[in-house]
Image (tube, helix red, strand yellow):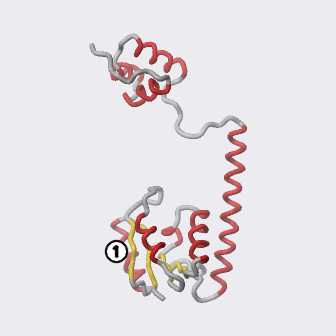
Amino acid sequence: MAIFGYARCSIRDQIAQVAELRAAGCVEVYCERANGANGDHSQRVKVLTKLLPGDVLVVTRLSRLARSTYDLFETLHALAERNVGFKSIREAWADTTCSPNGQVMLEILGHLAEFERELIKTRITRARARGIRWGHHRKLNYEQRSQVLARFAAGERRIDIARTYGVSRKTIARTLKQHQFSMSEPRS
């Protein structure tokens, strides 16, 4: 049985988290220097693949392991299936290594995560039914996009068109691409 630590932190917080994990008995600590929104969590993947049945994964706080309740539950469920223990230093109730209480609390957390996921799906379905669009709002309205197409077809440069509307050349390029215009600049 080995105890592994995982920390996700800024450089400033790294020393404190690593010290806490070492004090908790971790033989190896994997430290991620990325924010939670960033999709690249190579150290997390490394530690999760290294864990064997009987090993324990320790974090300083639950928020260090996952960004959402659903993601947390999925990770903890995968650990439990592999017979890997889990422990959070700051949330003492989240400990599957010493008593069944921690396992029960994590099961409740899992059910809440499933409930949260279903609520999100319902909200998305309702919003789509009302015609709500997701993503960024367009910088140019329909009339402006039509003018952009006409001006580009007349030989005007993308940079000049962009300056007129106060947008970037990329916005103009995307507009032209959506309407299958040639992306080559006309020569003046």
- In the image, residue 68 sits, relative to residue 14, either above or below, namely above
How many labels, in total? 1
Q: What element carries label 1?
A: helix
Check the picture and name the quadrant holding the C terminus.
top left
Residue furthest out toward the top: 154
Give the residue displayed 66% in from the left and 70% down from the top: 109
Residue depicted at x 41% and y 68%: 43
x and y percent of residue 174 in the render? 44, 29
Is residue 110 shown left or right of residue 170? right
Question: Where residue 19 sits in the image (x, y, percent)?
Answer: 37, 80
Which residue reaches farthest left? Answer: 188
- Percent position of residue 160, x then y: 34, 19
Q: From the viewer's perspective, is residue 25 above or below residue 61?
A: below
Q: Residue at x 41, y 64 (%)?
A: 42
The residue identified by callout 1 is 15
Q: Which of 108 and 15 is in front in this view?
A: 108
Q: Which amino acid does label 1 sit on?
A: Ile
Q: How crowded is mark 1: few (under 14 residues within 10 Å), some or many (20 or more)?
A: some
Q: Which residue: 64% across, 75% down?
A: 106
